Amino acid sequence: MHLCAGSQSPAIAVAQTLLPRIDMEYEVAFEFCVVIFILQGVTTGVKVTVPEAVGAELGKSLLIPCTLSHDGESLQSLSVMLVWNYKNDTSCCKRLVYFHDSTRDITESKRMNVSNDLTLHIFKMSFADVGSYMCSLSVVGHGTSVATSKAYIFSAPTTPEIIIESNLTESETTQKVGVCHSKDAYPKAFVIWYQDGQALPEQQVQNVWTRQKNQLCSLESVLTRQITRQDNNARFHCQLVYNMSGANFGWPPKEQNINSTSVNIVVHYPATRAMLHVQGHALEGNVVTLECSTDGNPQPLHSEFYRILDNGSRLHMKNGRVGNRLLLYNASRDDSGEYACSAAGLSNLQATTSLHVYYKPKGLVMPTPQHESHSVAWDLDKPILSHREEIRVRLGKSLVVHCNATSSSRPKYAWKKEGIGMAGQVVSLESTLHIKKVSYKDSGNYTL
């Protein structure tokens, strides 16, 4: 039976089914061949052995060694007859090679050859070469020995191509998720589907193998399963596990695998709630963005925004609305308050949030009463003293300078001094700069 047919089996199971089984019909056929090509005798002093099975890739060479062991004198001085025979599932026994003394006959000399160690070489393996090969050796006076090997052929599948359905929706019933295609496999491979790296149950996969004109196998593998919103953006790929010829004369076969690309799916599902978020840091003077979204997919095309006033009424915010976003240009602290939104077509789903617009410190530096004329204003954009005045203090006296600042959050202070051998050294982290017993080393420029 051609190995494109039949139900799906694991790769290891495929390998097991390939193990040679010589039934009674084969044995009778081979005995018939022996009668034709070899004089009957008893295997007494000579014995040949061949591998139980061999394998090769399609189009590559196949080697079937035939090893001889014997008792007594050297075979070089004896009359030896070697015959290689072949039989497949449909044909009768066919002689391929015949050696007897000086007589040499190779039926398909362009495709086959026998080396001095009795190994049969088959070049460019094809499906016509799959079958049983029998090495028969007859030595005059020593008897006859026969051994049979089963030859198999392998072909690697092409890289599977995955196609994901485009209209997947959350559903309590199963639906077709995707299809994997491959071709040129022999024998058929074992197919595994993965979601986010986890193998999916075989029950969710239906595989159809088709025999191609070149006798290789093509695959259509369909994944069918229930889809939920948790599957949105999940990544799927399929893997083919197949057998190729092994190391020792191609047997036992070597298991290999090949993967498709990984593709994410998009699942559509209804919304159950709305959310309103403030993007980034709401700072006075900047553009503040409020975004309305839902837990559904896809998101609504646009949303309506409202300002909730102190009396509980709502002010429809039309200016600055872009899709699902509300843009407050040149935001000020007066924009702080409660906001609400509703997604288009989902008026029953609304969300609210509190907006707090932060603003930078604003204050006044006030020296001691003796120096009130030296007050310095604060620069809003650059937190340093924008106006520098010279304050004269008697040597040994104390100097106290206060800074009172207001902001949306508790301000942090840092008094820095620039003087001889100093470049912006912090001298105080308090709102008050207090210098006791002023000395010459206290001279310099102080900034806040």
Image (spheres, rainbow, N blue to C red):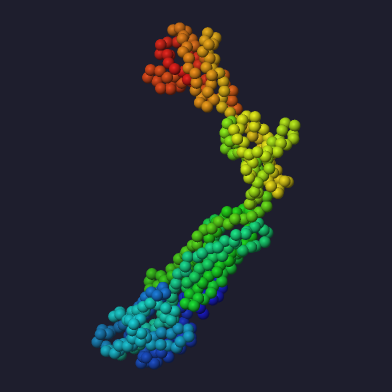
State whether residue 116 is above or below residue 389.
below
State whether residue 363 is above or below residue 57.
above
Q: Quadrant of residue 404?
A: top right
Give residue 327's position: percent from left, percent from top: 61, 38
Q: Is residue 16 visible?
A: no
Q: Is residue 447 visible?
A: yes
Q: Quadrant of residue 411?
A: top right
State whether residue 170 is above or below residue 403.
below
Comparing 65 with 354, the one in front is 354
Q: Is residue 266 left or right of residue 436?
A: right
Q: Is residue 248 left or right of residue 176?
A: left
Give residue 415's position: percent from left, percent from top: 48, 20
At 60% across and 27% down in the image, what residue appears?
Answer: 408
At 44% across and 19% down in the image, what residue appears?
Answer: 417
Give residue 212's position: percent from left, percent from top: 50, 76
At 56% across and 25% down in the image, what residue appears?
Answer: 361
Q: Is residue 378 left or right of residue 299?
A: left
